[in-house]
Image (cartoon, helix red, strand yellow):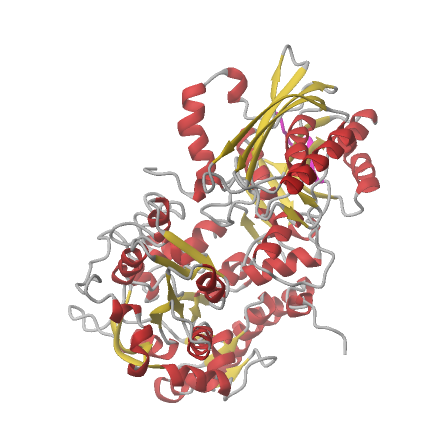
Amino acid sequence: MKTITLAHGNGGQENNELISKVFYKAFKNDILDKSEDAAVIEDGNLAFSTDSFTVSPLFFNGADIGKLAICGTCNDLAMMGAKPKYLTCSVIIEEGFDKRTLDKIVKSMKEELEVNGAIIVSGDTKVVPRGSVDKIFINTTGIGEIQYKGISSNNITSEDTILVSRDIGAHGATIFASREGIDMNTNLKSDCASLYPQVKALIDADLKITALRDATRGGVSAVLNEWAKQSNICIEVEEASIPISDEVTGICELLGFEAMALANEGTFVLAIKNEDAQKALEILKQTNETASIIGSVSAEHLGKVVLNSAWGTKRFLELPTGELLPRIC
Amino acid sequence: MSQLKLKDLYDGFRDPETIKAFKKIIEEDAKKLEKPINIMEVCGGHTHTIMKYGIPQLLPSNINFIHGPGCPVCIMPKERIDHAYILSMQEDVILVTLGDMIKVPGSNGSLQDARSKGADVRFVYSPMDCIKIANENPNKKVIFFAIGFETTTPMTAALLDVVIKQDIKNIYFHINHVTVPEVMKELIDSRDEHVDSYNHQIDAFLGPSHVSVISGSKIYEEFPRDYNKPVVVAGFEPVDVMQSILMIIKQFIENRCELEIEYKRLVSYEGNIKAQELINKYFKKSSLFKWRGLGNIKDSGLKLRDEYLTYDAEHIYKDILPIGEIEDHKLCICGDILRGMATPPECTIFGTACKPSTPIGSCMVSSEGACAAYYKYGNLL
């Protein structure tokens, strides 16, 4: 790695390499080493996370950069079983940016904060010369109060079942369709949504949750591969059970992508104790009818994800590599 | 009339029951074969399908695949990548190409590396997007680095057609289009000077259907006729591939050697005449084109006709584009893989020094490359 390329931000293999060889190496500590969606601090009582958002176009079917900036950080907290409470908001704006567009983005942020019951308690604004940033970059950092302790992607075992909370790839496909000017006569829109309400429903039902992760850059493929490695297990996925909408499959066909590697902004993967899997599925289906049990854990190929086809063949599902997808968030 | 949906294009062609049914018939019929059959899928798209859907796991041991040279990215020699790299580094140039091409390493690096050094390199899904880029950047020269087989050539021709008709002044072309039948002949005919023959293993071909959508199935008729190799023009869905394999097996059992079309839903004998006319209007055969790993192959490339030289970036920038030949990496056996003489795992640097994130050979770059397909889909199970 001599220079940083766009591939280093793909949420896949190169991204992991950049993080581990540069940042983890320099900042090494026990909390960071756990590699969870949010850091668990203060004796397991608080979750703490940060994320920066850049997306083109700023407004797309189903959401905009403002909603994304709140959902992204709140969802990282929710994935540790935490209720999002306090956020900071730091904005870098390119000179010449339209004030009304900024108002729309901030309004969108306000609405999404209300969904989470969270507030912005501190912030920062910078304006930089034209060309220094692409329109607007937003960073949000959040603290959440952990409601369910012990969630960790390092603890998945053969006693867990793997579920996905809804059909996958809608955000990535929407962004690509709008970027490439694909005029589709469909209902395709980003899945961008706050996940805390669904997590709360799972916690309230007293289910034994092992791990949660929202499938953002790198998609479901990246989550499953990271889990397989972190917990040193083999995750076996039934390809026919993976919910993918016709619209997303269509975009993938057209542009040569795999839905499993497309980004999501309101879809999460769950590892839950086998006996609670059906109940979890029922709860998730109350929000999204497409929620599905997609796989199980075995000891066949440790650290790997195996995809079983409906006609009896098997293959590994690898971590996305290279600049498969231009950056979308 | 109801609108055609994207779903209609693949629905049914990935049906598990149909695939299992083909598996069963193939198993039965393959027992009647006198010797094993090695089928070369010429096109990287087929390699991708075969690996992604695990087709080899469905076939009996006497049916083997040989992965062919039909990936436009894999066969691009370093010399051409270097051209693209040098062009992209010109201050007033926006270099535009198709997807995976930006990842292929040349002697100075890939187009991706050029971009990280400040070059304006963009990839498009349709060459027509060059028009928008050119309109938005009137002070820049947009150079379309055109790649691909018969499938993508009409789009380049169509772009040039629009450029001429609309008198667009800032779009130029670097042409790297190649044709399929010539390389197929090369694989059968070629001789290594030391061993006098490559002893090719090919018994039959799967012909890429998208090529024949444009050029018709007629481009393959010499293979059964003159070379005694059956060809089945096959679609890219798993059901298409399974059916095509069965068609090949049947030819062997019934002692036939023919050109057949499996992908009848879009392929005809004649092909798309309008597209062929457009190609012939703007392109002519170049006497030689160097294929990565395979060397110079006669009549296998296309170039712009002389009357369109003012649009030819290779001509305009001839003073800065190198003409010397570059050797491939010593340890890389892409050439043998493209010839069907070796499989990716036989390469000593496969999956170690050469990975999709750090490709040494082009077969590891494109998702259509044999090495990338083996790496990604494992074939380990």
Q: Quadrant of residue B93?
A: bottom left
Q: Residue at x 49, y 50 (%)?
A: A324
> Residue A261's spot in the image, x, y percent?
57, 47
Question: A246 and A184: which one is in front?
Answer: A184
Please provide percent x and percent y for residue A23. 44, 26
Percent position of residue B186, x then y? 29, 76
- Would you identify the image quadrant in which residue A149 lies? top right
- Asked whether residue A268 is in view, the answer is no
Does residue A7 show up? Answer: yes
Q: Nearer the viewer, residue A265 or A31?
A: A265
Asked if the magenta segment contains residue B229, the reply would be no
Which quarter shows the N terminus of chain B? bottom right
- Towards the viewer: A315 or A195: A195
Q: Is residue B309 left or right of residue A311?
A: left
Along the line of sight, the residue nearer the viewer: A302 or A246? A246
Above or below, A25 against A101 in this view is: above
Q: How many marks?
A: 0
Residue at x 68% of width, y 29% of height: A74
Q: Would you place residue A300 above or below residue A182 in this image?
A: above
Q: Position of residue A135 (x, y in %)?
A: 54, 42
Magenta-highlighted residues = A155-164
